[in-house]
Image: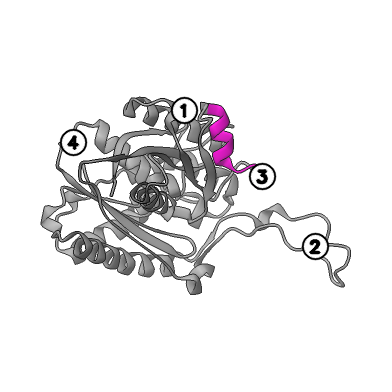
Amino acid sequence: MNNAQIIGTGHYAPENIVTNDDLAKIIETSDEWIRTRTGIGERRISLGENTSDMAAKAALKAIEDAKISPEDIDFIFLATYSPDAFIPNTACIVQASIGAVNATCFDLSAACTGFIYGLDMATQFIKSGRAKCVLVIGAETQSKLLNWDDRGTCVLFGDGAGAAVVTAGEGPGVLACQSGSDGTKGWTLTVEGVPVRNPFMVNSPDAMYDLTNSTIKMDGKEIFKFAVGIMLKSVDELLKASGLSIEDIKYVIPHQANYRIIESTAKRLGVDIGKFYINIDRYGNTSAASIAIALDELAKGGNLEKGDKLLMVGFGGGLTYGGVIVEW
């Protein structure tokens, strides 16, 4: 059976940096208020680049890092909840942009867990022999979904993209995958879609759709409670599946949602926070892109050696959750 290996990574974020002080000029907030509650100091906000634009730039960096050609890619799995359009899917737009002419393309919708879901799927496709080379991308333009008058959400999120090339190989590679969902808590994090309306309905909604309905709405307290518990569950299941202990893990790469969530998880695992790779202070919560961006920063920063074991774990809207252990 083929083993799935990550052979290249890349990421891209808009050049436009928005600090907490910048936000304080447009809403009632402060740098101190945001930092103490979230750990965020700044985030990248698009000045026009859409999800496919950022995804393509991250993808090309990962392809270059992997030393492959776009034509080598069999599948593109693109995780996002902020696509360019309903149709075509954003993965197809990226395919055309980067010239991956042989790839089958589709989007995944699992919010912040999307990149993890994509890695899991890529692993299964490769192990089964269905694919030899898969491009997994997490990309979000959340700025277009934010209510910029709601300080409870607009201070949290940023735009960006990250990508990984996963191929069949003989080395260890992906050691374990874990995932799950809890749809009963879906109401805690939502972005509404277009309502059902047609001329055959007795009480059809107004023809004009109120765009303010399609902004991020979140119950932060419920998400916090879910996040810490589910991250611990994912870590435990991954370690059991791989036969490893937390001491065997060089770095934990968590979804970058809130520093306090990461800190609480580390404490309950009984490990030093230094084992967790954290960049939320510079990017905010980039949803499906967050783990992918962190993975690329870690890889390009000279922090990894062959044989190092990484545990990536996330949670997101749906609610969804999951993780992957990789031997580098």
* Quarter that holds the C terminus: top left
Q: CA distance from mark 1 to mark 3?
A: 23 Å
Q: Is residue 43 within the magenta segment?
A: no
Which dot, 2 or 1, sits closer to the camera?
Answer: 1
Label 3 Cα crowd, 10 Å radius (few <14 / some 14-19 / many 20+):
few
Is disc 2 placed on a helix, strand or loop?
loop
* Residue 286 appears in the picture as rendered: no
Residue bearing mark 1: 71
Q: Earlier in the sequence, mark 2 or mark 1?
A: 1
Residue bearing mark 4: 303
- Given residues 291 and 188, the one toward you in this image is 291
Which dot, 3 or 2, sits closer to the camera?
Answer: 3
Which segment did they paint magenta? 86-97
Label 1 Cα crowd, 10 Å radius (few <14 / some 14-19 / many 20+):
few
Q: Earlier in the sequence, mark 1 or mark 4?
A: 1
Is disc 1 placed on a helix, strand or loop?
helix
- Given residues 313 and 26, the one toward you in this image is 313
Which dot, 1 or 3, sits closer to the camera?
Answer: 1
Instruction: Tell me which amino acid carries mark 4.
Output: Asn
Q: Earlier in the sequence, mark 1 or mark 3?
A: 1
Residue 197: image tag: 2
Q: CA distance from mark 1 to mark 4?
A: 30 Å
Is disc 3 placed on a helix, strand or loop?
loop
Q: Magenta region's main secondary structure?
A: helix
